[in-house]
Amino acid sequence: MDRVDLRSDTVTWPTPEMRQAMAEAAVGDDVFGEDPTVNALQEAAARRLGKEAGLFVASGTMGNLVAILAHCGRGDEVILGDKAHTFVYEAGGIAALGGIHPHPVPVQRDGTLPLEMIRAAIRPDNIHMPVTRLIALENTQGTVGGLPLTKEYTDAVGEIARAHGLALHIDGARIFNAATALGCDVADLVAAADSVTFCLSKGLCAPVGSVLVGSHEFIARARRARKIVGGGMRQAGILAAAGLIALEKMTGRLAEDHANARRLAEGLAALPQFEVDLAQVQTNMVFFSLRPEVPITAYELAERLKRHNVWIMCMDERRFRAVTHYWIRPEHIEQTLAAIRQETP
């Protein structure tokens, strides 16, 4: 890349191998189900996550939207975290387009939703209330530091869902980061879920796309929902070719990103101007803050860092988020720390 860009792992460029695969991809009309590269990606994704079928979609937002549309009808309700990406950052699509009512539950510091609060949020059979159809989790939970949710916790939520006749969806945008951090197989991690979406275009480096997986019946409904929201693509194998490399090769190197995030966090923790909770740095995200006495805002410091070709996201006047990825190497972490030391009073 042409900069040290730590704002997000969405900034990743496709690798040279991906670009070559895209140029040579076999293609067909995916709306007709005839694109062989898309079909191969969908089948590989389903197999990898232990589900029956997959659906290639344009983005994680689209994946979550069509999943919830496939699980719920108008006036139905989904229980999800009050800091979940679907609730906060997806433009209210489930309500605006699906007429689906979100029931937010507080996200805890460890990224979980309290089990007792999930149980309490499930509606009784009452004509005055929406019908609860779905529970949605996010793994990793990005808003509290990219924390992974364990298999044990996910299984416990799955048990609640089954006991009440509900479905469980996982926004697994970074589910492979979660599996890497936990040292477990991704299919085991999501075994309790009825559907999972994961992003190809974040730490996995593909330029576009996510995959939604679930049962054959569920994916058939999701395919229809994808068409409704304008997600039917034609010769999408050009994009899916990069996704196959992301799935087959990039998922195996995420521990490097986690190590670089830890390296950055420890360097920041050693600087007196900053606060960082090292216990919260478990995957590829580092949240850190300026101490109150530092006479500069986060926005001002971020602008100063650009002089060193280092880009970091500001969360507010005092807080930052840095996300490591394929294009960030150990030497870039040292460059970033040196720039921060130079520019912070």
Image (cartoon, helix red, strand yellow):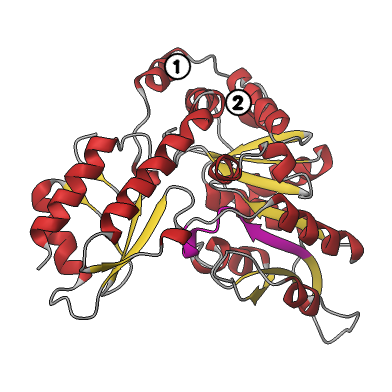
SS state under label 2 = helix
Nearer to us in this view, 41 or 341: 341
Of callouts 2 and 1, the N-terminal one: 1
Where residue 304 sits in the image (x, y, percent)? 11, 59
Q: CA distance from mark 2 to mark 1?
A: 13 Å
Relative to 86, 9 lies left or right: left
Where residue 114 sits in the image (x, y, percent)? 69, 72
Q: Residue at x 68, y 36 (%)?
A: 185
Nearer to us in this view, 223 or 148: 148
SS state under label 1 = helix
Where residue 141 sits in the image (x, y, percent)? 55, 58
Nearer to us in this view, 9 or 88: 9
Q: Is residue 67 above or below residue 128?
A: above
Q: Residue at x 77, y 44 (%)?
A: 191
Residue position for label 1: 21
- Residue 80: image quadrant is bottom right
What range of the chain is rendered magenta? Answer: 134-145
Q: Is residue 149 magenta?
A: no
Quarter of the rendering occupied by the N terminus: top left
Residue kind at label 1, given as amino acid type: Ala
Q: Residue at x 18, y 73 (%)?
A: 297
Residue position for label 2: 38
